[in-house]
Amino acid sequence: MKILITGICGFVGSTLARAWIEARPDLTVLGLDNFIRPGSELNRETLRKLGVTLYHGDIRCASDFDALPPVDWVIDAAANASVLAGIDGQTSSRQLVEHNLLGTVNILEYCKRTGAGFILLSTSRVYSIEQLATIGVETVGEAFRLKPGQDLPPGLSSKGVGESFSTRSPISLYGSTKLASEALALEYGESFGFPVWINRCGVLAGAGQFGRPDQGIFAFWINAWKQRCPLTYIGFGGKGCQVRDCLHPRDLIPLLIMQTSPGSSATVRVINLGGGLDNAMSLAELSSWCRSRFGEHSVAGKPEMRRFDIPWMVMDSSLAQEIWGWRPAISLHHILEEIALHAEQNPQWLEWSGIR
């Protein structure tokens, strides 16, 4: 089987390529990357040594797909993945749309022309911020938890946010481009007869993730703590009680193998993939973990809220387990320790990530 991974030299793309080749040595992997993200060049040589054929191209440019040979599947891991993209004064809203939406169109046109299947790595950020922001939470220890006894909105349970949760605006420019990409992908697949899967991923984390707070909060926090860089709890009283779950990209491989296998016939095309409650923690809890691992470090508090901040976001992946028998296997502790070891071995990681 031959696959193309877009954004292959990013953290998720490169991790998937390495893990998939390890699981299936006979796999042929092609990769497309524009190398605009700081640190992405670091993965180029490792992938080449594994036999990956790399193409320097940009998914926003339709002609960059003309040089690509046909493949069986495309895994789209290329995105501007920041919820603040386009509104933070540092990135262009037009470039965000071009990258996350028009780039998807170019990939889908390639799939239409070659007959390749398409797997979109989407995001938990397609879910309604307004709905998530009004969920009742209480502080238990150092973290928010859902208040017991409340009437939860459709799609939300004690397990987390399910696929039927509202996707009503606002969901951020980033979230809206991914939601629109989902709709286009499903329509292209239906109209032109190629298979499409939409995998809505929670926070992805692991060693080698570039340390930027808007894209890899777990990696950023651990690296910044190790290097004694300034850290701040933003919003929600400046206490760091907001909660996220995390998932290692390697945990996606068993599912991707099933989705790309001949004869995969599941009728549900959109599923959540997250670490769930077992892999969830607050920033304050992450700080406690860092303190026990690296020693003391102070964290400032800034109570003022930012747009799109939410107190609690845990992905419910029950549907993936029901349909595919999938569940995360890599524990939260393993993910954090993996990042910590990488931080110790690469003290300049924040500089390579474009932070300092």
Image: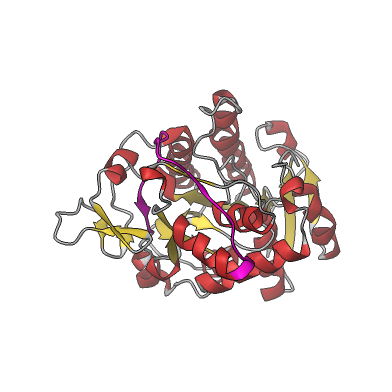
Give residue 16's quadrant in the image. bottom right
Q: Position of residue 57 (x, y in %)?
A: 75, 39
Secondary structure, magenta segment, majority class: loop
Q: Position of residue 145 (x, y in %)?
A: 30, 60
- Judge whether residue 299 is colored magenta: yes
At 54% from the left and 57% from the top, the residue drawn is: 204
Q: Position of residue 59 (x, y in %)?
A: 66, 38
Q: Name above or below for residue 292 compared with residue 99.
A: below
Placement of the N terminus among the 4 image quadrants: bottom right
Residue range of the region highlighted in magenta in the rendering = 293-314
Identify which residue, 60 or 235, lies in the foreground.
235
Placement of the C terminus among the 4 image quadrants: top right
At 48% from the left and 67% from the top, the residue drawn is: 264
- Residue 315 appears left or right of 338: left
Give residue 78's quadrant in the image. top right
At 34% from the left and 40% from the top, the residue drawn is: 129
- Residue 64 appears left or right of 293: right
At 43% from the left and 64% from the top, the residue drawn is: 280
